[in-house]
Image: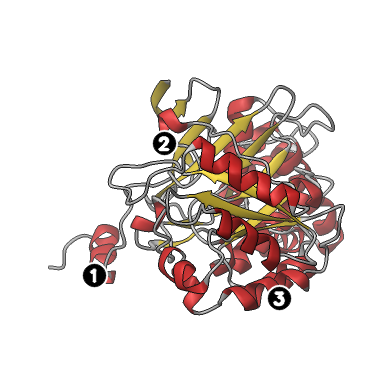
Amino acid sequence: MSIVPDVTVGTRTLAPASNKRDLVGLTREELAAAMRDIGEPERAVKMRANQLWHWIYHRGATSFDTMTTIARDMQKRLDEHFIIGRPVADQLQQSSDGTRKWLIRFADGEQAECVHIPEEDRGALCVSAQVGCTLTCKFCHTGTMKLVRNLTAGEIVGQVMLARDTIGEWPSPKDGRMISNIVMMGMGEPLYNVENVVKALKIVMDGEGIALSKRRITLSTAGVVPMIGRIGEELGVNLAISLHAVRDELRDEIVPINRKYPIKDLLQACRDYPTANNARRITFEYVMLKDVNDSPADARELVRLLAGIPAKINLIPFNAWPGAPYECSTPEAIRRFAGIVLEGGYSSPVRVPRGRDIMAACGQLKSASVKKRASERYREANGPAV
């Protein structure tokens, strides 16, 4: 394991006191509107927005003076009004297995974590949707935090851009990407920040920018049932469900959102998911908790529940964290469980833990950010009252 503290990735960041607008996270339409706001002639608005899109999202530019297709006087004008923001990496850790974890600081000082899991010729970037989490899943370290706030679309996209800065993946390559996949499986519940998540992923999927296919993006939810269909209709990305139990009584305890959206309703939303088919199966994530949810009876019930859903089951050995109330199932119990599920007709790979030595594995992410009262935020921004 190696730790690199106080690493600033990207040359431009947005200070809280800046009056300049950050262009990262803006859609094409919003970029065009921003050009109108600074008086750009209507005949040039679309062209200018396309130029900026290319430089920001395809080439990864962090300053306007590198944009060689834009005239020098226009570069200066843009610099007077805008910045191309990046979050700051307060810490970058690298695991013995090559996994990287960034502790990312945003403009207001709040922090979230982002993880890159490399393979030989590709890699997945695990992106956060919130600082903290509104859910309190008992097996998840992030769940011990309170929700601090949602991340903006720019802060979500910014995680991808920061990671590509570090890996050196600009301009956007067509093949051989080390960030070949994005998984919305970091801190927070993506569907409780659905507007910003949808906006960010549409930017990431745009073919003239970062250009990741919807087939390369997976969104994981603990089960915000009303929003699942929207994700299928608007984004068409792969869906992953944090299931973890086959009985409502147990899921109520370890995934408390189940009290609002029980298993029956959740599975019906999965059956209705627009892009679900045998070629694009829904992934059901199932953390293996010793003597809690790992019995042969649990495995057989899981097969029964998923009947008719194009699915695969990811079995996740529990990744411990300080004070965790559970232990990981034994290797024998996991093999037995996987065998029953496989015999039932469902693929059941056991996820190989990555980044455990830097607390970057599934369920281990957490930052020191805490929710503050409005009065505290006011004092930090304006100083004490006189």
Specify the quadrant that holds the N terminus. top left
Residue nearest the viewer, comparing 279 with 204: 279
In the image, taking residue 382 as reference, residue 306 lies left or right, namely right
* Residue 147 in which image quadrant: bottom left
Numbered badge on residue 375: 1
* Residue annotated with mark 2: 359
In percent of width and height, residue 281 lies at 79, 55
For the residues marked 2 and 3, what is the alpha-carbon distance in whole angstroms? Answer: 34 Å
Amino acid on which the number 1 mark rests in the picture: Ser
The percent position of residue 156, horizontal first and vertical second, equals: 58, 52
At a point 68% along the width and 51% down the height, the residue shown is: 341
Q: How is the image coloured?
A: secondary structure
Viewer-proximal residue, 249 or 237? Answer: 249
Upstream in sequence: badge 1 or badge 3: 3
Write down the quadrant of residue 90 in the picture. Answer: top left
Residue at disc 3, secondary structure: helix
The amino acid marked with disc number 2 is Met
Name the residue nearer the viewer: 169 or 115: 115
